Image (spheres, grey):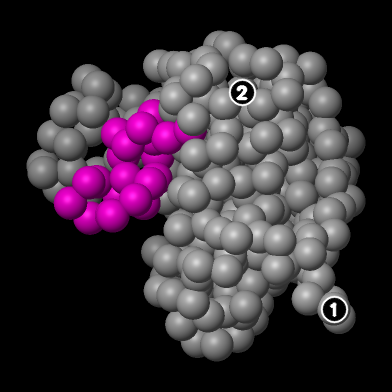
Amino acid sequence: MERELALEIVRVTELAALAAAPWMGRGDKHHADEAATNAMRGMLDSVSIRGTVVIGEGEMDEAPMLYIGESVGSLQGPEVDVAVDPLEGTELVAKGLNNALAVIAVAPKGHLLHAPDMYMEKLAVGPSLAGKLSIDDPIRTTVEKAALALNKQVSDLTVILLDRERHGSLIRTLREVGVRIKLLSDGDVVGAIAPAFAETGIDLYVGSGGAPEGVLAAAALKCLGGEIQGRLMPENEEQAQRCIDMGLSDPRKLLRMDDMIGTGDVIFAATGVTPGEFLSGVRMLPDQRAETHSIVMRAKTRTIRYIKSLHYLPNKPLLADLKH
């Protein structure tokens, strides 16, 4: 993939974030998601790729655009897999809470896992713990190994996970061992990649979340030198068969980075919609302007770029077509 593609795809997440931002706090996650999706799909047409959506808004009969299997891009340029979440954290935007993002990852064709829409058990870490932990260990062992590797006391570790009823036993165990816990109301991608940013103060991401979000997090973590391990959690025979139909002969096998995003290059971009762990949100400014804060990364070079952009909204025709 050409390096110029990194700057092209960040324009895609910028527009999606700008489209979603006016819905912040309005209690309408569906229209927020629709606005972000429409904007992202429209901007993708300008990107010089022959892309196929492998992670998107759902199957063709579930989503009018950015559906799995849809062709995107200008249809000129490299053949690539595209994984998108136009609005990661729809509920966060609806309630005006932190950590909502517009997210995209691009990799050479055939490299991104076509992850089914189901839960995935996850363990995500930053560079300091990459290769040193196992998702198969009990959580007590994982925490002890992490503390030893980081030369910390267990009580100095910070673990992040989604605040869900299914995590009740896990949360109780973490509290028993004495780590600090940060609970997320939503924001699975943010949670998984947060340990790779030293400024967040987070050491581990554990628990279960969406499988598609796991692949997006894997793309980011490869660029950051971190690691994610995952295991799909089919809840019935129908879901298990769906995994098999999508090419996963063993639905419950341990999925490592190479299984999720391949061994080649990958580009990841995200733009903050609301303020978060490592990105600011969209700021609406006087004179019909808005400011966005984005990150774009490439695994091949491990270059991480933060981009702060000032947009003159009347010159964004795709936004003008969206109704707020």
Residue at the disc numbered 2: 266
Q: Residue 234 in the image: x percent, y percent?
A: 24, 44
Q: Is residue 91 left or right of residue 190?
A: left
- Residue drawn 72% across and 15% down? 300
In this picture, is 196 found above or below 168?
Answer: above
User: Which badge, 2 or 1, is on the more N-terminal residue?
Assistant: 2
Q: Residue 180 in the image: x percent, y percent?
A: 75, 62
Residue at the disc numbered 1: 287
Foreground tag (2 vs 1) = 1
- Residue drawn 44% across and 75% down? 31
Magenta span: predominant SS is loop
Specify whether residue 202 is in view: yes
Whole-number angstrom distance, CA of label 2 to CA of label 1: 37 Å
In this picture, is 219 found above or below 111?
Answer: below
Q: Is residue 254 left or right of residue 144?
A: left
Q: Which residues are magenta?
A: 52-73
- Residue drawn 11% across and 42% down? 237
* Callout 2: SS: loop
Q: Residue 108 in the image: x percent, y percent?
A: 51, 16
Q: Which residue type carries mark 1?
A: Asp
